[in-house]
Amino acid sequence: MSSSVSQQLSSAPENPKKKQGSHGSFHRFYDINGWTFVGGAVALVALFMIYPILNSLWLSLHSGRGIVTEFVGFGNITRLFNDPVFIKALSNTFIFLIIQVPAMILLSLALSSCLNTPNLRFRGLFRLAIFLPCVTSLVAYSILFKSMFSYEGIINASLLWTGIISDPIPWLTDPFWAKVTIILAITWRWTGYNMIFYLSAMQNIDKSIYEAARLEGVGAIKQFFYITVPLLKPVILFTTVMSTIGTLQLFDEVMNITQGGPADSTMTLSMYIYNLSFKFVPNFGYAATVSYVIVFFAAILALLQFKMAKDK
């Protein structure tokens, strides 16, 4: 009996997975059927994403007017340190980043916490009102802000009428107030966008955690800082990274509200790239170098944020 069983086991077919061994994934990589399905998508990605990235990297090693360029190697990088307009645009971009991103994240957290209250009336209306700015046209709302914050606009008229100020504020013609206007504009637009992420994440937190905290006598403020914020850390990290990248690429609001003025006080890196490519004498090689500065800082800041948010 035992000999017949052993003969049957020896004659049984081998497991195909064991037979393939480590060569299974190798053969699947060269499977023509799989590449037939994904080949078109891979070709489009290579054509419209990988090739432009590599071409812009090669272009950043050249300099010249228009299409007449010469290879300068790392000469464009050396030029960056001696370019006062680039240094001004870089400092302006980081001022917007350091002030606006934390303020927007904190405001989004506060609003989402308030709008997550179960007994709040008209919650849906408030959520829609705060989220609505992020789906409006960039150009339309920028022109609206430019009109509102003009010297004789509705903002100055309202402040004068209420007696808060005695003289109109030069929102668009003073370097300090121009920065304030840009910060107010992008905060107004993108706060609701981040709020939706926090609100959806808060609604997925188990309610029993808050009930247990209330039974232990933990107040609402401590619940927010010791329960809500720690559980929202992955979402906070996501919104912070995306807001950082978006602020480093800030262009539309500056272009439509202040055009980078006054005296380049609101000039950003993205607008400087636009000026180098289309407004000044075109120097596409130097513009490509400035664009890689944005890529560099976006990568560094994202890595730092991931490092800081890492669990101990």
Image (tube, helix red, strand yellow):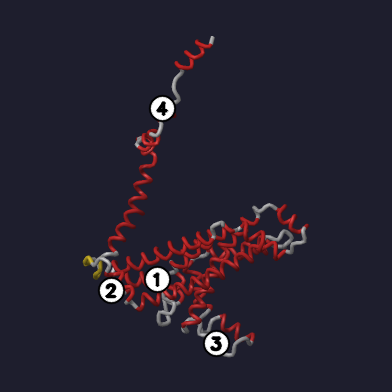
* Residue sitting nearer the eye, 8 or 247: 8
Q: Residues within 10 Å of mark 3 (few under 14, many from 20)?
A: some
> Is residue 202 found left or right of 242 in the rendered image?
right
Amino acid under label 4? Lys
What kind of element bears circle 4?
Answer: helix
> Is residue 293 found left or right of 199 in the rendered image?
left
What residue is pinned by disc 2? 281
- Between label 4 and label 3, give the one nearer the viewer: 4
Real-space CA distance between mark 1 and mark 3, rounded to the nearest whole angstrom: 30 Å
Mark 4 / mark 3, whichever is N-terminal? 4
**Quadrant of residue 59 in the image?**
bottom left
Q: Pinpoint residue 76: horizontal percent, then vertical percent.
A: 29, 69
Mark 1 / mark 3, whichever is N-terminal? 3
What residue is pinned by disc 3? 168
Q: Pinpoint residue 246: horizontal percent, then vertical percent.
A: 47, 65
* Residue that appears at 67% across and 59% down: 227
What residue is pinned by disc 1? 269
Give above or below for 258 relative to 36.
below
- Between label 2 and label 3, give the one nearer the viewer: 2
* Residue that appears at 56% across and 68% down: 104
Q: Pinpoint residue 39: horizontal percent, then vertical percent.
A: 36, 42
Quick one: quadrant of the N terminus?
top right
Amino acid under label 2? Val
Real-space CA distance between mark 1 and mark 4, rounded to the nearest whole angstrom: 57 Å
Amino acid under label 1? Leu
Q: Pinpoint residue 115: horizontal percent, then vertical percent.
A: 67, 62
* Residue sitting nearer the eye, 215 or 85: 215
What kind of element bears circle 2?
Answer: loop
Mark 2 / mark 1, whichever is N-terminal? 1
* Residue that appears at 45% across and 25% down: 15
Mark 4 / mark 2, whichever is N-terminal? 4
